[in-house]
Image (cartoon, rainbow, N blue to C red):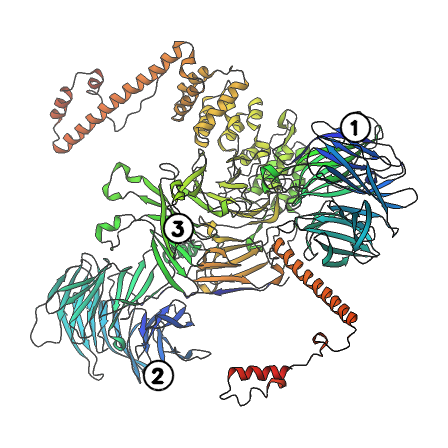
Amino acid sequence: MASHWSLSMVTGGIPLELPYSCITSSIFSQDGKYLICTLTYQLRIYFISTRQCIKTIDIDLTNLSDIKLDPMNENQIILFKNNGEFLMINFKDKLIDPIVSQKSLNIELPLLSVVSAKHMSFIVISGKFNKKKNHAHTRYIQIFDRDSETLTTIHEIHNVINYSQSSNNQKLAFVTSTNEVHLIDISKEEEISKEVLTFPYKSPIISIVISNNSIIALGCQSGTIQILYGGLETEKPQRLLKWHIDQVKSLSFSPDNLYLLSGGLEKVLVFWQLETGKKSFLPRLNGIIDKISIDDSKNEYISLLLRVDQVIDNFEILVISQVDLVSRLSVSSIRPKFSNNITTTINKTKKKYFKLIDTFDKQLMRYDYSCEFEIHPKSKNLYFPNQSTIQSFDLIKNEQNFIQHAAPILSTGKVRSETKLIDPNVTILSFSNDGDWMCTFDEILTSEVDNLLSKNDKQYALKFWKFNNNTWELTTKIIDPHGAGLPIKSIIAAPNSYFNGVAFLTCDSKTGLRIWRPSTPKEQYKTTTGNKNQQVAWSLRKNKQSGGLASDAISLAWSDDSSLIFISHEYNISILNSKTMTEVEGFKIPTFSESKIRSINLLGHDLIILSKTRISSFNLLTGQLNDLVAKVNTTSGGKNIIAIDPIKKLICLGVNYYNTDNEEFKINSKFFIFKPNSLKPVKIINHNTGISSIRYFNSSFIFIDLNCRVGTITSNDLELQENIEFNLSNEISSMLISAQATVDIMNNRQVKTNTNQKNGSIEDNDDNAISKIVDLHTFQPIFQNLDGVQIDTLFDRIVEALK
Amino acid sequence: MSIKPDLYDHYPITSLPRIPDLKLNEKIKISIPSNNNTIDLGISKSNISTYLIKPSPKLLWSHSLNPTTVVNAIDTTIYNDNKIYLVSLTDRNKIDNILLIKAKINDNTIEPATDTFEIKLKAKCKCINLRILSEDKYLIVYENGTVEFLKFENNELSLGSGTNVEDNKLLNSTFINDLTENNELFLLTISQKRSSLLYKLYSIKDNESIIEINSSTTESKSKNPLFAYISGILYQYIPESKLIESISITNFKALSTVSTSSIIDENDNDLTSIHACAPDRLLISHSDTLYLINFKYEALLSKFVSKSSKTGNFKPDQIYLNLVSQIKGSSQSTQLTNAYFINLKDKDMNVYLNSIELNVGFNKIDECLGKSINGNPNQNNFNQVLDIFDIDEDKERENSTELHEIYDSLKTAMESENINKWESILIPYLKNNKQWSEIKIAKPKNYEKIYNFKEFEAENDRIIDINFLNSILDLIFQINDDGLTFKNFKFIPEYTLMYLLTNPLFPNKYSSGLIELFDQLDLKVLLRQTINTCPRISCKELVNQLFKQNMSDEILIDLINRIINEFNHREILINIKQINNENNNSIDIVNLISNLIKLNSDNIWYLIEILIDVRGLLTFGNNENLENLLQIVDSKLNLIESNCFNLSLTNKLLSKNTNNNSKNEIENLLLSNQEDKTKAKLNNEKISNYSIETVEFI
């Protein structure tokens, strides 16, 4: 059977971090109308005044080190990669291939940043990467002659921790591990002037910036900002600016050099008036301010690179106006919460692999990389629970919709000892089938800070939210919903056959089950007039007591006809009658797996069981396993890598494996599309990155890969299309009407002919008029010379033509 | 009354006259009953009658027929005080008549027939279905597929308008009123024309017009298909292939097919009848059995077999299903209905009209669990479990014989009682130590090799088909009337069992009764392993074992740990109570408690708490036990007290130690507290970092 399956990527990954460049991961076009943003696999071009993305260019941007506008063509930008490659990209015109040219600098050391790109030459800085903070390396200032394609080193500075350049690209400042700042003026190419400033050591230097008039600001780990004045005849005292209480991550001078902008872990953007030392603040930004930049081509706007996730490096680009400090544009990507940091764990595994190269099982994932996400049935947005927040992401616009705080949390950034405060963690998120209700479960660990006896106590909260005008309103919050100390491990929405699907089933770690449904207080029924916002409270309706053994391996399934509830606990599955909440008698599901069950899914009358070591499909009617039984290694988040298409009756299973081809070491994946009763897959699709999570939505499978991209797997296979369920009553009625109509016509005709015969008339009546052939030529003359013709006249003409 | 889908409570309504030249399906026609209490019958060559069926069958009314007249169809209804019987008859001379009888109803009795009217049908064609539309308007369906109105005017029956005369063989015709919301009447006819089937759906409008609204012709799959209709779906039974096909009546296209070949045997001579009792549920009669089938889930919900009570060399009874009252079968109030069938008892050659009650269920999956029509096809058929990376979308699975070879060699080892050989094959294979090819060529050593007990490890061990595991255990165990036992008491592969007992896949089939078996045979090691690791042992079995005598303390502690860790308080309590009741309160809880107290484990206190709950503290009878318990509590309290003192003392010492290392001061401190004996003791002893206190039972 030839089935046409296609895998396509929908988003382009997360905004890039360019650690050595002076810009955030975005750049304004020369006319200041467009903002070009770089994501890991995509260039996005935004039209600033409408905030809309007008164009995307799919291109692999890993290893990008800097972006510059092409001085020769305002529609082009130059992308520099750290291996010396540079690409000219036309971002504006509609070209088949937006990559205009691709060349290389032939550089030996990694290219770190580009100081300037001119008609004839590029000035670049190269050197070794800083593997750790405060590693010092030599930096080389090099000129690339575009004509002769030669690279010459014009200067080198040793032991550089960090460096920066002025916005006019003429001054460079290098801070070294010996507490010196090397100020280098490259305005005259022939003659480089250099000045060395020393400064007293306060704490490690995190950030540095230099203004066009040679003022240098250094941001320290401890929070102070040191100001040094360079290029002066007479010494000017160095200054300290104190407000930050933790790392100053980023600094920038305003275009007129009167203000210094700084940002750090506090999530507050600080404006320092240099003359007076007065400060003003823009607080409560979405993340740690990693970089501040002001583009020359649009200098009334400030772009910020905000670090929104610390587990994986995820960023948001925020463009605000200097005038009113209002956001002009915000570019962010999906924010899944992977259960492990991907880069560090892959590096660990890589080391292990090279140690045990022969015995290493490449199909056994050493770490879990899954993430939770759900698709809201009503708005079709993706929802990512991440710590205490839930991000709603619009896949069609490819933009973040909103961020919902699901649990209370400090909205300011955490500094110093505050980082020990543990945020509440939303672990489970579920939507009712109609999308009107959302159920979340979060847990708060008492913070270590207090060091009380209650240190290890967790507080649990189950929350029910109603979808109202595109926002979520909290209707009910239940503290410790399964009793103190018992966390909920699984939540599923009821099938539509159970109170129209407005119910949630929760299961705790000891297989205690509870069914929750909303209820409207009775008094409210009486006063139905006017008051639309009836108070709805969710309450416990049914309950099954907990067993004795706690486990993390809990999964639920509820049959479509709502009669049966399936719970898996460790490696056992039990079936409950949903009415009585007692175990079904006379039918037991045997144990299918020697290892913990990750998830159970019901597909018609087949139960699909994914465990740590195998996938099995069990027919509930025959009480026997189907052919689909295979060995597969899954990690603890295994429930996220299987999805069920209930209409086409398909299973999509994503399997990650380590790929060591080409002496690389990375994670690749395969998607298996199965039917529940056959081991032979309908399709196997390969993907060049690992996958984290799969869900089913609207006849396609939507997945998140380890590069933070969203992809879809769809089939246009007609064979698999199921008959659309018909409404019998309606169909019969319409058949009846058409049959009646036919009969009526027949009858009328008979009647007419009868009357004709009775009258004995022989004259032609309208019914028997000879039909006229109508085509283009009939109407052509009418529509000639239409100027000034009244609509009535036109109508008359048409009638005339038809007669 | 039954709460599950079931066929139950059958009884005869009447016995039918012995007329050998009529087939079972021709003997009687039943009008669709309008209520649950009476039934109207047209018995060929006998009479037309009305029976009261509840509370017990009783003849209410009858109108006798000429002994040569065959009833083709009957419909009845009540208008005001009149009961109308409309019957299609064929007499000896092959003359077809329609008989209309009007009878007065008085209270609960029907007066003898006075007004009878008859009309001869012109087109010498049998009327095989009819329907009373109103008091004076009727519809008749001919054998050739023609449909015609019949009027009753001026005390006279007359034929009205109808469809064009056709010349087909009508296979089935059904009056339908469940299609639209206002219960409009439709007529579905299925007729055969040479090798094709002709479906037609008519709308019967205002008792005046017959409009064909849908028709379709398909290739006939059978010479003699059977049909049943309910709620928009037509079911076609094809006797040749034993398939049931569901067909949508909006387009007459097949929706799905279910095979009944596993329940309906090959004997084509037996009569089959199929009726729909509720949406997705069918009642089929074949040979001597009635089957209640859920079509959607392909499940056999229930069956009823007619059996003659006396044994003898009789042919099986015959059942022919005549009629089922259709219901919705979706709620508590719409799941019970009645079916009427003819039952031919071969013992006395009598034919009875029987009624049977049926519960059709809710059409939910919980009623169908494990009840597939097709039974359990691949039991004991095992395959190698493939790695998902070895699966190819273009290749079919290659069947390896490896597992079967292993099974065969294990079987021979078992039959020859060669435990050594068995152990040299199975465990190395399952532990993934050796490939089968290696094991095969390795010669089993003659001397008794000592194997180490191996535990199951999910990460490293071979992933095997659960059916293979079942088959292996089939070689070791058997289940007979006394429960689980070994197949051969000389063949107990201990190492294999030890390993398998640690595997969560150990089937439930052989885990229940295992404790009992090992206990009886005094296999201590296996018993302990079972208690520790064997999955899915019921709480009751474990609790039961608690009350066994002569258990070593080790096993008892393991047992208690398992019970307390795996089950909740309530469950254990219920099970102990149950066991207590089963043994007429004779289990010795007091004795158990006194045994438990001797053990050193925390979990015993949970169990003791439960045990006290079972009977209550006051029923402990002699005060001695209570005293003992009190003493334990007292001694524990004393221990806590002295421990508490020791702890504070140690703390004090430590704090003194850090400040000033003078020995005198410490001694002074100790001496200053020399009031209590316990405290005094510490004077000469070294104070350890922790103390161990054992509970002593006095």
Circle 3 crowding by C-alpha within 10 Å: few under 14, some 14–19, many from 20: some
Disc 3 marks a residue whose amino acid type is Lys
Q: Nearer the viewer, mark 1 or mark 3?
A: 3
Find the residue positioned furthest to the right: B93
**Above or below: residue B605 compared with residue A615:** above
Based on the displayed image, in which of its 4 quarters is residue B8 positioned? top right
B247, A362: nearer the viewer: B247
Disc 2 marks a residue whose amino acid type is Asn
Q: Quadrant of the C terminus of chain B?
A: top left
The dot on residue A73 is 2
Q: Is circle 2 on the same chain as circle 3? A: yes
Q: Is circle 1 on the same chain as circle 3? A: no
**Above or below: residue B331 compared with residue B585:** below
The dot on residue B308 is 1
Residue A725: percent from left, percent from top:
60, 55
The residue at the point 41 percent across, 50 percent down is A438
Circle 1 crowding by C-alpha within 10 Å: few under 14, some 14–19, many from 20: some
Find the residue positioned furthest to the left: A234
